[in-house]
Amino acid sequence: MGLFLSGRNREPEAENLGNTEEESSVFRTAVLILILKPIPKSYILQRENTLTMLFDDISRNYKGTRGYTEPLYEYLNRSARPSMERIRILLKDWFSNFPSDAQNELRTRFRASDNIQHQSAFFEIYLHALLSKLGFHIEIHPEIPGQPTHPEFLVLRDRKPCFYLEATLASGPIEERAADKRENVVYETIDKMNSSNFFIGIKVHGSPDTPPPGRKWRAFLEEWLSKLDPDAIGEKLKSDGLEDLPSTTLNHDGWNVTFQAIPKSPKARGKQGIRPIGIRFFGFQECKEDEWIRNAIREKATKYGNLDLPYIIAINVLSIFSNDGHMVMDALFGDEGITFYRLPTAGSDHKLTRASNGAFRGPHGPRNTRVSGVIICNDLLWGNIAKINPVLWHNPWASFPFNQDFWVLPQYVPNSDKSRVEPKSGRKAADLFGLPEG
């Protein structure tokens, strides 16, 4: 601690404390002794451990669910649920195997309140652990001659460089994420309202361009619910189902929200700590995950110039709707469509075609040939590690093709005879990690 007591910073205090030159000299001597006195090794180790800890060493007693606006890391760090403790133990183990000189920066991002920063850091920890389980050695942020930037990993086997790997997230534009945050603020506000007799069902259409009046909506809903009879509505629910439950609709700047009153069971009424929001239904939305994937590849494809090894981009698609091989196929090779044509004799026929808007195939043929393939993860986060299986999609036109034998998980490999890519089965990531599936 004496390291902070520099002469420049403390000289005025020495003058104030010493009424005579002798007293001032005694004070300076004491400061010098404090500076030169060795700091206990136990303190240094404790300080180093604190600075490199992925999670806080705290007592935990919260067993509830995550709030709508609560940062992902904050919830994982404070939750006392056994499942969260198991996740913390696993991630601490993975993080401890990350090279020590890269841990501080990674730890800072992992502990960030910004969910994108947190998910990005988690994805890197996950990929490092996965590649290690596959028998690789990993160098962090390798130097690329002539390039000021560095890919995430240089992956080696038996000390021989095998490929470069870059990790990235694919998500909606900033405007969509901002709208989601505005919605979550309202949900958080409504979830704190007094609703002793009813759960709330929510049907959503559109998204708000400006912050909705959450407190005003909560007050309105509290008054509306107070006038309803839970017993009478409960009987109606048994006979007519959810569709005929009492409802009210509120609107704000392009966001239309219908609230349904769902009666609680008599035993649950009046109990504290039960959140009122029970069900959320989302209206039909256009799936744009294929665009997200294309944008992610476009951003990373040429970032490091012409590499002398295969180059793989690992993409975590942050959407529950991304678990669709057809969507990935569209993103990489172009949107699927149907072309009709006339026959020479009479009538017409059709065939399946692809638009020239794929990440691997564009208007002038193959493109982004520096990219050897992409690893697709579907909405991967620490809560579903055992459920998600990364899939490798090879680029048939890659300048440096990726060795299929390196990847024992599922992959899509080129079949040159049939001019297409075909699925190749593989092991499950959960098995590699020794985790129970599901």
Image: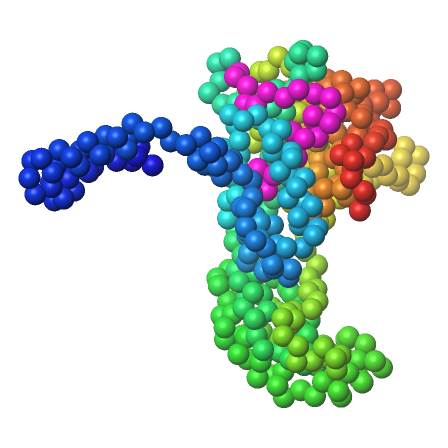
Q: Quadrant of the N terminus?
A: top left
Q: Which residues are magenta?
A: 117-144
Classify residue 334 as left or right of residue 53: right
Position of residue 291 measured from the top left corner of the image (x, y, whole percent)? 64, 41
In the foreground, 13 or 388: 13
Residue 176 lies in the magenta-colored region: no
In the foreground, 387 or 17: 17
In the image, what residue occupies the spot 44% across and 30% down?
A: 41
Q: In the rendered image, is residue 359 in sight?
A: no
Classify residue 398 as left or right of residue 302: right
Position of residue 273 measured from the top left corner of the image (x, y, whole percent)? 63, 71
Image quadrant where residue 243 sits: bottom right
Position of residue 317 measured from the top left corner of the image (x, y, whole percent)? 66, 41
Position of residue 49 measured from the top left corner of the image (x, y, whole percent)? 51, 36
In the image, what residue occupies the spot 49% across and 70% down?
A: 213
Q: In the rendered image, is residue 249 in sight?
A: yes
Image quadrant where residue 255 sits: bottom right
In the foreground, 293 or 79: 79
Classify residue 375 as left or right of residue 118: right
In the image, what residue occupies the spot 48% across and 62% down?
A: 210
In the image, what residue occupies the spot 56% across and 44% down?
A: 55
Find the residue positioned furthest to the left.
20
Find the residue positioned furthest to the right.
345
Q: Main secondary structure of the magenta part?
A: helix
